[in-house]
Image (tube, rainbow, N blue to C red):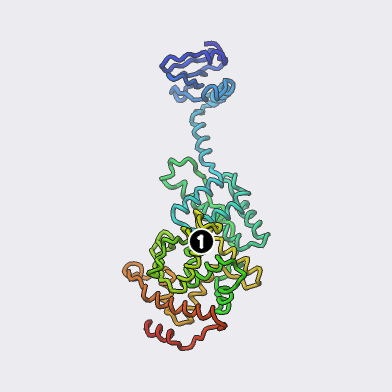
Amino acid sequence: MAAFSDKNIKSLVITGVNYRRYEGGSDPGFGVQVTAAGVKTFFYQYTHDGRRRFLRLGTYPDTTLAEARQRARAARSQVDQGVDPQEDVKKRVREAKSRGSVQQLTDAFIEHMKANGRRSADEVKRCLEKDVLPHIGAMAARDVSPAHIREILYRLISRKAAVQANRVRSYLHTMFKYGIHHDNDPRSLGAEVLFGIAHNPVEAVPKNAAVENAHDRNLSWDEIRTIWNTEGIHLPYRLAIRLLLATGGQRSGEVTRAAWSEFDLDAGLWLLPAARVKNKRDHLIPLTSLAVDILNELRGIYPGSKWLFPGRHNPLALKPWNESTLPHAVQDYCTETGMVPWTPKDLRRTVKTRMGELGIDKLVRDRIQNHALNDVSAKHYDRYDYVAEKRAALEIWCRQLGQLTSSECMRPNLSDSPDRLYLRKVSS
């Protein structure tokens, strides 16, 4: 056949069987295959190591005749140099596959976190989208160097967010570690994207230990009374704070993302399902009359809602509050009032500490807050629910809260009250 032209390629007929046509011009081995269905594909036939081989060059007309001819000539040049062009193509495909971007790594990492029940996945995603992806999101993950990490963290430090810089560093370190493990996991052999990360670029960038002080903020009795009664916090946020206190200092996300289906107000019980609990065990929390009153007030604010705290203050919202909603409200309150800064997480420590002052035994306090108990007996053998002990302690705690927040009393009397003496007797 003479040199190809668009006219004679278009004129190739469909015969119902596959056939090939070779060009008779200056590019030996260059040809077109026509399938039984009429698909026309350019190819280059060559011999390498004594074996005849065919290299696919593209489908006509998506690949033009000129493009196919150029590819055939480039392949012929490789053959003349002893290189198999198909191996070169495979190598380039492997390299392209191993150039997953930082954006793709982030997406895969967040999905991995969610699949493993990590409740911080949304917050990690928010931080990375804000402080990382605008700068290196389009880069191949394997090309990120310690210099890129330093530059990202420097931007945060420059805007006086040194603690946040440490958080972002931690997220990035874990994310790149995940990328390395992802590529080496046998289950990833068929993955569409690999990352080709040889070394974790965050390893060489030190954490700023100077800004990471031990967390010890806990609110005094006076401060508890202040935030309970303040008008400076929007009512739903104030009720969330009250419920955190009245339920014994549960984790803030467990309270603000709770569904009404978890509560039995008649029985005075809240069953936190294992899927929402850090240690992946159902957690049973007795509800005092104070806690039930708060819940009923919430029901009146958001009638018909599936959630205690529906997103965007909409009773029919499909999602509860984001985990950052209450922390931001508390931060704004502290800024506006000049109160020594605290976070909803600090209420957990506050309750633990103030309950101790009331004489409530540490074992009971640990059970109320569902702290991980690592002794063999607690982990493997003790299946008692401690509901009676938790209820007695929460009744004492909430009785004190009620007295503190409804009177002019600014601090409880921690002398040997009947409650304190009773608890000493029980714990002994």
- Judge the density around disc 1: few (<14), some (14-19), many (≥20) Cα neighbours within 10 Å: some
Q: Residue at the bottom extreme?
A: 416
Q: Residue at x 38, y 64 (%)?
A: 282
Q: Residue at x 56, y 60 (%)?
A: 324
Q: Residue at the right extreme?
A: 158
Residue 396 lies, in percent from the top left, at 44, 79
Name the residue type under label 1: Tyr
Q: Residue at the top extreme?
A: 2
Q: Nearer the viewer, residue 27 or 416?
A: 416
Q: Nearer the viewer, residue 175 or 25?
A: 175
Asked which quadrant contains residue 278, the reply is bottom left
Residue 348 lies, in percent from the top left, at 50, 71
Residue 387 lies, in percent from the top left, at 37, 72
Q: How many marks?
A: 1
Please give left or right for residue 347 compared with residue 264 in the image: right
Asked which quadrant contains residue 362, the reply is bottom left
Give SS at disc 1.
Answer: loop
Q: Residue at x 59, y 64 (%)?
A: 329
Vertical arrangement, residue 69 with respect to residue 343, above or below: above
Vertical arrangement, residue 71 with respect to residue 352, above or below: above
Q: Dividing the image into 4 quarters, which one contains the C terminus?
A: bottom left
Q: Nearer the viewer, residue 94 or 100?
A: 100
Residue 59 lies, in percent from the top left, at 51, 24
Q: Residue at x 41, y 69 (%)?
A: 285
Per the image, the residue denoted by label 1 is 302
